[in-house]
Image: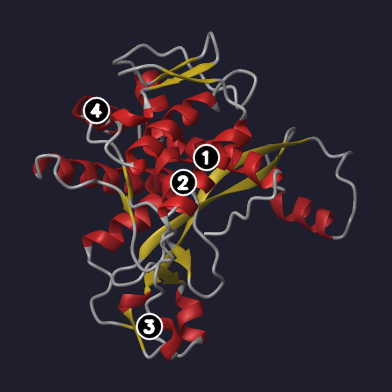
Amino acid sequence: MNTKKLYDKITSTIIEMLEEHKNSGYNKAWYNLSGDAVFAHNRATNHFYNGINQLLLQYLKEKYNYAYNGWLTFNQLKELGGKIRKGSKAAIVVYKSHLYIDANTGENITAKILAMEKAGISTDDIDYQKQGYMKGYNVFNISQIENLPDEYYKIKELENLSEFERNEKAEFMIRCTKANIKFSPNKAYYSPSADIINLPLRQQFKSDSDFYRVAFHELGHWTGHKSRLNRDMSGKFGSKEYAFEELIAELNTAYINAFLGYDSTITNNVAYIDSWLSIMKNDTKFIVSAASQAQKASDYIFDFAKAHQLELTA
């Protein structure tokens, strides 16, 4: 499947997700991280999928009511003696790869460059251009597979942290960023010009999860400052740039809060959802790019905590 078809397939799935959310009257969250494991992962390697893959696999898990959040490639399940249940459809996992093109002739010299790199031979004398593209491969949910070893069908219980422990970990992560955070009633925003986050008073929130959802949303915006990840923060409300930045912040929040042990969902803000739908129908790269940027934002926040020895395993 070529790159354009991959973008089209991904975007059509997310549009379907958003349209279903609208049809439900915005009652059911269109993205929820929960289940036998917080994040979708490869069951054989325990690798946790990133970015857009997390979004797509979680949606399919909920859509088809899979009992598990683990996935296997065809070769992996075959090696384990597994058999795909009749009628099961594969999910696509995507990743970025690169081609190496001769700058003078336009010839694809990828195999040559990779062979030289593997052999430790310098490529400095070759004039080439590096071109990125997207590749995909199929995976199947554990619920779609028969005859696997018994251990693959055991439901992994979530380790729900106690309120005190969960709060302490979230607070520690926030403190480690050293972001300039102020508190004043009824206002939640990030100001790029002043590089300040303002949050409502803690007592205004109904629950800890509500507070951390807002806090990490604004910290998501904070990562985009020119001194950090340097994203375009100039978009006005209603613009494509504004919608893009809000989607980044929302996905960043979902990733982090799910790690913290909360069931984490994406906004019910109708204006945001309608603007995302409008853009996705004309720009198939929009959701993939936003998920990639959100992953960078959450990794950026996690890195502060890692530097202070907080154990960050999902």
Contact check, label 1 and label 2, Cβ < 8 Å: yes
- Sooner in the amino-acid sequence: mark 4 or mark 3: 3
Q: Position of residue 70 (x, y in %)?
A: 42, 70
Q: Quadrant of the N terminus?
A: bottom left
The residue carrying mark 3 is: 153
Disc 1 to disc 4, how far (Cα)?
36 Å
Q: Position of residue 63 (x, y in %)?
A: 22, 60
The residue carrying mark 2 is: 167
Query: Mark 4: which secondary structure?
Result: helix
Give the mark toward the camera: 4 or 3. Answer: 3
Give the mark toward the camera: 2 or 3. Answer: 2
The answer, for residue 287, to whether it is visible in the render is no
Query: Mark 1: which secondary structure?
Result: helix
Give the mark toward the camera: 3 or 1. Answer: 1
Give the mark toward the camera: 1 or 4. Answer: 1
Is 263 situated left or right of 289 in this image? left
Disc 3 to disc 1, how far (Cα)?
35 Å
Q: Amino acid at mark 4?
A: Ser
Q: Amino acid at mark 2?
A: Asn
Is 121 situated left or right of 19 in this image? right
Q: Compare residues 11 and 104 and report the one nearer the observer.
A: 11
**Mark 4 neighbour class, 10 Å CA radius: few under 14, some 14 to 19, many 20 or more:** few
Q: Compare residues 314 and 26 and report the one nearer the observer.
A: 314
Disc 1 to disc 2, how far (Cα)?
6 Å
The residue carrying mark 1 is: 171
The residue carrying mark 4 is: 278
Q: Position of residue 179 (x, y in %)?
A: 58, 25
